[in-house]
Amino acid sequence: MNSIGKQVLNALKNEISEIDYQRYIRQLEFNENDSKSNLAVFHAPNPLIANWIRTKFADKISHLFEIKTGVRPAVSIVVKTSTAATPHNVAVAVPSERPSGGSLLNPSYTFQNFVIGGSNQFAYISAKAVSEKPGIVYNPLFIYGGVGLGKTHLMQAVGNVMLSEGKTVIYTSVEQFLNDFLRHLNNKTMDRFKDKYRKCDLLLIDDIQFLSGKNQLQEEFFHTFEALRNENKQIIITSDKHPKKIGGIEERLISRFEWGLVADIQPPELETKIEIIKKKCEINRVKLDRDVINYVATIIENNTREIEGILSKLNAYSQLMGVDITIEFARNVLKEQMAEKRSNITIDLIMDTVAKELNVKSSEIRSKSRNSNIVYARRIAIYLSRSLTPNSMPQLAQYFGMKDHTAVSHTMKKIQELMKNDEDFRIKIEELSNKVSTVTDE
Ligand code: ADP
Ligand code: MG
């Protein structure tokens, strides 16, 4: 008779696409010895597949167990270690049913695995300092920036350091905090709720912008915040915007968010993206040539979150087909998805978009005019060309009729500085960047 694990995987086959099954689920092995009625343990061949299954299928697997056994187990996907274990390939074991109100940290979100670049070094240094002196240096630490720039990674890096020191760490989203709050309110167990959130050593609240408009929850969070701070317990908060820009949040909370340190993360430069991809390859034990890495860097734009999806896809296809990942192979695999639109971004397209949005002519952008509007548009066009196309600085210098690459580099710094100091400007640039990317979709 098939083991229960096998039965569940067979049942799962009927619920998901054939491709997903072949690519991911087929590679799972049920570990009967380590499993219990409330814990189902599977082995995956590498962390990529483990991660993917964890996010996409763990809930389904857990549910199928429930149907067959009546008990809904936590699902643990453990990486089978054939080579010597490094800290990265040990295990990604996340139960699909998380302990209510807080979830486990991603063990690969460490400082060691975080690539430092100009765009994120301030946030990195701040988080590092907090991990060394929690509750003392900056409390709270407030990290903000666009999607996929590493906010969650950094806050969990602090969490992982403190966990390893035996401290109590709670990581939660606003939604989880809310659910937990309502549950305890319903069950009349608010003292337990307070105990939990006010007695931890580190409270990580991710994406606080979702607190906007939730007045009762803000009230509760305010008291949690006060209690923790009075005890010198560390609080780290992330958001997609600066505290002042979130809106719909009580003034007294906003001012407290700014009490400690507010650190921003900017979109990574191409070089940083390349380093992040290399890091992800290393962690996931995927081998990519330099030209493939560069290619992936140019298509991922600013959201580094896409990297793992892309690596997983490349890896799965190459394993399935038994071929190496060459640049042609990568282009082919990624083409249908998102690659096409991104690799279609050209300087000309950027020029057209910038010209239209800023009301200047694209011929003027390339001219030597010192008119301030035109200089402004030119700088933005150069910045976007450097961020969104694979052109090198010397190539851009030539295109824009500048003396040499140092002039381009100077412009890049100038724009980055502006983006850092001027939130509205940053948003404007992000909008332009999105416009350029979506034009190529049509
Ligand atoms: P955010 O919370 O800002 O939306 P995440 O922290 O979820 O972004 O990051 C998205 C993905 O990109 C994660 O896999 C994370 O590990 C990775 N990542 C982002 N920035 C870096 C970096 N500087 N070094 C290494 N990985 C990074
Ligand atoms: Mg996040």
Image (cartoon, helix red, strand yellow):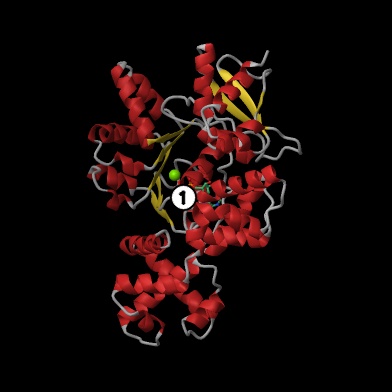
Q: Residue furthest right?
A: 83
In this rendering, the count of numbered labels is: 1
* Quarter that holds the C terminus: bottom left
- The residue identified by callout 1 is 148
Looking at the picture, how far across and down is residue 89, in whole percent?
A: 67, 38
Disc 1 residue crowd, few under 14, some 14–19, many 20+, Cα 10 Å: some
Between 208 and 399, the one lying in front of the other is 399
Q: Give the residue at x 62% y 55%.
A: 330
Is residue 285 placed above or below 21 in the rendered structure? Answer: below
Q: Amino acid at mark 1?
A: Gly
Between 60 and 249, the one lying in front of the other is 60
Looking at the picture, how far across and down is residue 321, in whole percent?
A: 69, 45
* Quarter that holds the N terminus: top right
Between 292 and 328, the one lying in front of the other is 328
Mark 1 element type: loop
Asked if residue 227 lies left or right of residue 33, the reply is left
Looking at the picture, how far across and down is residue 425, in whole percent?
A: 33, 65
Q: Give the residue at x 66% y 61%.
A: 290
Is the CB atom of the residue marked by disc 1 within 8 angstroms of ligand 1's nearest atom? yes
Looking at the picture, how far across and down is residue 270, in whole percent?
A: 54, 63
Q: Quadrant of residue 392?
A: bottom right
Instruction: Tell which quarter ligand 2 is in.
Output: top left
